[in-house]
Image (cartoon, coloured by chain):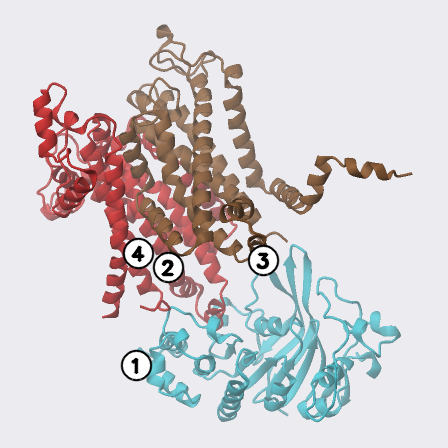
Amino acid sequence: MRILSYILKRLVYLVPVLIGVTLLVFFISHAIPGDPARMMAGQKASRQAVENLRHSMGLDRPLPEQYLRFLWGIFHGDLGTSIRNQRPVTEDLADFFPATLELTLTSMILCIAVGLPLGIISAVRRNRPIDHISRVFSVFGVSMPVFWLGLMLLLLFYRNLGWLPGSGRLDVGIDPPINVTGLYLIDTLLEGSWSKFFNGLQHIILPAFCLSYVYLAIITRIVRSSMISVMGQDYITTARANGLSEWMVILKHSLKNSLIPTVTITGLSIGELLGGAILTETIFNWPGMGKYVVDSVNFLDFPAIMGFTLVVSFAYVMINLLVDVLYAFLDPQIKY
Amino acid sequence: MPSLIHKSSTSLFEKYRREHAWQIREFLFTLKLLSRNPSAVAGFVIITSMVLIALASPLIAPYNPIRISLSERLSPPSLTHLFGTDEMGRDILSRVMYGARISLRIGVLVIAIAGGLGSLIGAVAGYLGGKTDNIIMRVMDVILSFPPLVLAMAMAAALGPNLNNAVIAVAFVMIPKFARMVRGEALAVKEKQFIAAARASGAGNLWIIIHHILPNCFSSVIVLATLILGDTILVAASLSFIGLGAQPPTPEWGAMISVGRKFLMDQWWYPTFPGLFILMTVIGFNIMGDALRDILDPRIRR
Amino acid sequence: MEEILLDISGLSVRFFTYQGIVKALEDVNLIVSKGEILGLVGETGCGKSVLARSVLRLIADPPGKISGGKIFFKGEDILGASKRRLRSIRGNEISMIFQEPMSSLNPVFRVGNQMMEVVMLHQRVGRGEARRVCVDMLSQVKMPDPDAVLSKYPHELSGGMRQRAMIAMELSCRPDLLIADEPTTALDVTVQAQVLTILEELTRQTGVSVLFISHDLGVIAQICERVAVMYAGRIVEISPVRKLFSNPGHPYSRGLLKAVPQVDEERETLNVVPGVVPGLIHPPGGCRFHPRCEEMWEPCSRIVPHPVEIEPGHQVACHLWGSGK
């Protein structure tokens, strides 16, 4: 199938990039001042223990060999051992991944559910009040310090209004649902526990909104500008001249054409969301990978930090590939 | 009667004016367009205010930002302390003002490094083309494969948590953005006649890059720099918030929020005001950058 | 006496722009009778497209506005019609084909999808029947392999095929009036001839009236029975095609005809009409052509000339023939 060969071609291009990513992470982790072996062993360990550890970790080998070991480890899912927890980093990340996934997905859904209609309305009602409001909203969005927004949201909705909880995925006394997907919102539904579902929903609203705000603003802007440029095209005049209602013109003929830049930006935003999650999870005490890495930073737990960096950038690269493929689906003029 | 003797003593200023007459005219035209554009004016006002605050803070700050006064700790905004005090009794308004110095300094440093290095790298890649271009751009792609904050965080953590390392980390992350853009412009410029002329007259590659390619990219670099400045301040503040940039008690906005977070519930003023300033500064740069980009768009310049 | 299909009287259209108010159409009077092919010829910028779009009220408002006049279609007031009625007329009783077939078809939908959409909208039939109608129309425009064309995207067809598909689409609901805005301008000469032949045949078969707009006198001569000449937003001459060529009344029409190079003529330079088309924010007073007219005299710059009938069916708006009224 042609699509398959297109995907394969893009994957091939990706390989050098992914290798580059591992190289960069490797270089960074070796820029660390201080002795990694001693840090692993702890301050109180004897010199011999440190040397043993150094040898067993392969830290006394020449650099290229260390890199190859590192690469080998990645292939086998071994990202080193967390200094803080003394557990494999891979296990740690796997534990915290579902929470981050849930937050990111919810934010994405929010972005699209609000950003798409808002962008369309702004384009159709150009230069009317709603357009001006959404443009101001956009400027605030791209300029917003996410961690500060989170704090302000907490201040308003948690402290002053008391409407929403301030931390965690569920209230303290509630047990988590049975682990099917790891996403509480889905698992609680599968379990049939409505009250848990609502509780989880309450807990996720603020962090999801906080995380999505920046990209909501960006998506609204992109949708607006691509809709405006699409609606100036000749084929839209044709559609109108054929007697189609304005709704059909907007929702069928215009929208599909403006989806292409929208999808691109949305896809790229997912990657950025992974970055923003770091700050949001910290503010809302959301037990995901982001909070994990911030805790690791405070502890100077380098294997964890580097492991996280590697995983997130791999995900980012994969998402970009997905966006490219989706692009090919949406635009019939792309030859693959 | 005009004396012929005066010709040889034409001032340097006059010579510069004549040689660069066209560029000067373009520049003044840009300024005129900017002054007509409401968002450009608004952005300019905000940025200038921040710069003034930053520069003048030692003079206008009501208190010494590190002056501790435990008896006044955590007091709410009042006439004596407009933004209230922190957990050591330090005046938050003064600290926020000094914070402007720090943030703007970080921004300028990062842009200078990333802009300078990035533009050079991009110009070299675009002008030399071929394999060099390929390799350089692949490297840039690799850097761009990381979400910016994540990469900056990894680097800052590895180098050590202090302000200078944060600057290096953020600059590193921003380099590819400049490189990409300048490369694109270099590709266009290198086909122009005067480049061939320069080469024919024996100019070396480096000379051409520095004296011909780069100046032509100048206006786009300025626009990009303005737009990226906002992002830079955000990333730097985020790093400090995580604990990787400025360390307390430095009155950096992000660091203040990081500490102030603990006091959010009962002393709302503590994290609120620094964050407000971050927001305003970044808004200023963003709308200024947007207006600049629109104005310099050749389609709009009639 | 033929039945009047489209009656445009006193139509004026203005565009409100930053630079000023563009008087794109001024007091335009035009009648299209049932079953006739009326040509509308004029230079780029004379307002032909604006006129065409006004009939279907496709002028974007802002910045455009129909500032005066009336348009009656089959006795019905178009300018006063409800949005709903207008939508049922568009594509159904009055259809329009445009100049650029590439940009006039939506690139992300298949041709069949776009064609069937129109049929299903106006004829209220299901997909199967709509498909049948479309295949039928496509074969009428001599499209090879109509079934395959339906599943193709616009960019997969050649320019001529796209234009034929557009013609098929717009005639699929059997409209009473077809407005063709420079349908062959963007095509190669050979393809142009094909499309014109198809158009001619179809209009004869179905009896649809056509308002054929072009800047090319040759094309107009080939397909139209009557022709209206437009200049700077006004109609300056209306006449049966033969009579226009043999006895052009307006100096502008004469200039246009002279400008067409003849095969047997020996020339070194083209016979152009001197001067340039005026800007329409501040158009010339009186007769808008007077600054370029070789035969301009006293009243031309002051008084707007009204059409005078110089022979049956042949009207000219020029002071040389009287001021009319």
Q: Which chain contains the residue that carries disc 3?
A: B
Q: Which chain contains the residue that carries disc 1?
A: C
The verdict on a common chain for dots 2 and 4 is yes
The verdict on a common chain for dots 1 and 3 is no
Q: How far is disc 2 from disc 4 in space, using C-alphas?
A: 10 Å
Q: Is residue A52 above or below residue C54?
A: above
Give chain C's shade. Answer: cyan
Q: Name the residue under label 3.
A: B193
Residue A323: mark? 4
Q: Which chain contains the residue that carries disc 4?
A: A
Q: How far is disc 2 from disc 1 in space, using C-alphas?
A: 31 Å
Q: Is residue A308 above or below residue B255?
A: below
Q: Using residue A201 as the reference point, say whether residue C3 is left or right of it.
A: right
Q: Using residue B153 as the reference point, say whether residue C282 is left or right of it.
A: right
Q: How far is disc 1 from disc 4 in space, using C-alphas?
A: 35 Å
- Decide: marks 2, 4 in contact (CB < 8 A)? no
Could you tell me residue B224's position as x and y percent? 48, 43
Residue C128: mark? 1
Report the amino acid beneath label 1.
Gly
Tell me the mark number nearer the camera, choosing from 4 and 3. Answer: 3
Report the amino acid beneath label 4.
Val
- Quarter of the view holding residue B264: top left
Chain shown brown: that is B
The verdict on a common chain for dots 1 and 4 is no
